[in-house]
Image: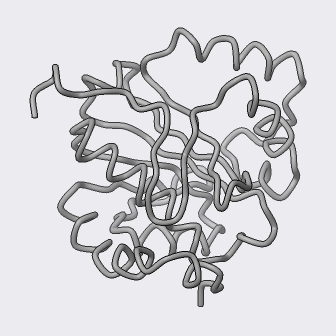
């Protein structure tokens, strides 16, 4: 696939979920969720966000080509958010390295196998559609659940620095690690109601 065939998608569907680009109708959810203590305490920036800050951020999204933010929907219920951002501020259509962030806000789906679905969807999009070579993220060193979750997707952990561990993923590692998860989640919505063990 050449660069001219790459396209920024406004929505992605698969593995029982749909990712919808943040827009006027759903952006208020991110403001609410991002300020919840259980989500905020796992962020790099743990400060509470003021409404004016959120509104300014939302307005700035319209002109950005280096990132995308999505609301995660399962059975038409908004359950969380996921984003992808170029590591060096290049357009997502041209970057080789991007960062991914996710949180599940809906209590019923925290710790659920469903949490893998949006990650599989955004990773497929990054590696296959956008042809990004590497994905990375920072995870709090004491967030053992998130570290295990990401390792199951094929991420490798680097050394701890400042209370965070940098994790990275290549397409090859992702393809190897995600085969069983994809088969499992492709079986339909009954299977995703289970908790992660």
Q: Residue furthest left?
A: 2
The residue under the point 60% across, 50% down is 162
> From this viewpoint, which residue is outermost toward the bottom?
197
52 relative to 130, above or below: above
Q: Is residue 139 left or right of residue 8?
A: right
Q: Residue at x 34, y 45 (%)?
A: 125
**Residue 17 image position (x, y, % from top left):** 55, 58
Q: Quadrant of residue 62?
A: top right
> Is residue 50 left or right of 12 when viewed as pictured?
right
Please identify the quadrant where the C terminus is shown: bottom right
Q: Nearer the viewer, residue 157 or 131?
A: 131
In x, y percent, where is residue 73?
64, 53
Question: Which residue sits at x=57%, y=33%?
Answer: 21
Q: Number of numbered discs present?
A: 0
Q: Residue 38 falls in which quadrant of the image?
A: bottom right
What x and y, as percent, mark residue 34?
A: 79, 42
Q: What colour scheme was applied to this rendering of the protein? A: one colour
Residue 30: percent from left, percent from top: 76, 38
At a point 81% along the width and 19% down the height, the residue shown is 53
Location of the N terminus by quadrant is top left
On screen, residue 74 above or below 88: below
List the single residue furthest toward the top: 63
């Amino acid at each position: 696939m050449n660069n001219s065939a790459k396209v920024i998608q406004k929505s992605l569907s698969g593995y029982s979920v749909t990712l919808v680009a943040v827009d006027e109708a759903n952006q208020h959810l991110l403001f609410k969720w991002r300020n919840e203590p259980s989500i905020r305490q796992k962020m790099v920036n743990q400060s509470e966000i003021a409404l004016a800050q959120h509104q300014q951020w939302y307005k700035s999204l319209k002109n950005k080509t280096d990132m995308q933010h999505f609301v995660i929907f399962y059975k038409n219920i908004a359950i969380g958010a996921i984003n992808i951002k170029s590591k060096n501020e290049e357009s997502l259509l041209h970057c080789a390295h991007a960062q991914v962030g996710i949180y599940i806000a809906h209590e019923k789906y925290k710790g659920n196998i469903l949490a893998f679905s949006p990650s599989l969807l955004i990773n497929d999009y990054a590696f296959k559609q956008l042809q990004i070579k590497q994905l990375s993220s920072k995870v709090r060193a004491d967030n053992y659940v998130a570290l295990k979750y990401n390792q199951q997707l094929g991420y490798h952990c680097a050394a701890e620095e400042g209370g965070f561990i940098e994790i990275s993923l290549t397409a090859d590692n992702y393809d190897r690690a995600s085969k069983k998860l994809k088969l499992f989640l492709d079986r339909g919505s009954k299977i995703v109601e289970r908790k992660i063990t």
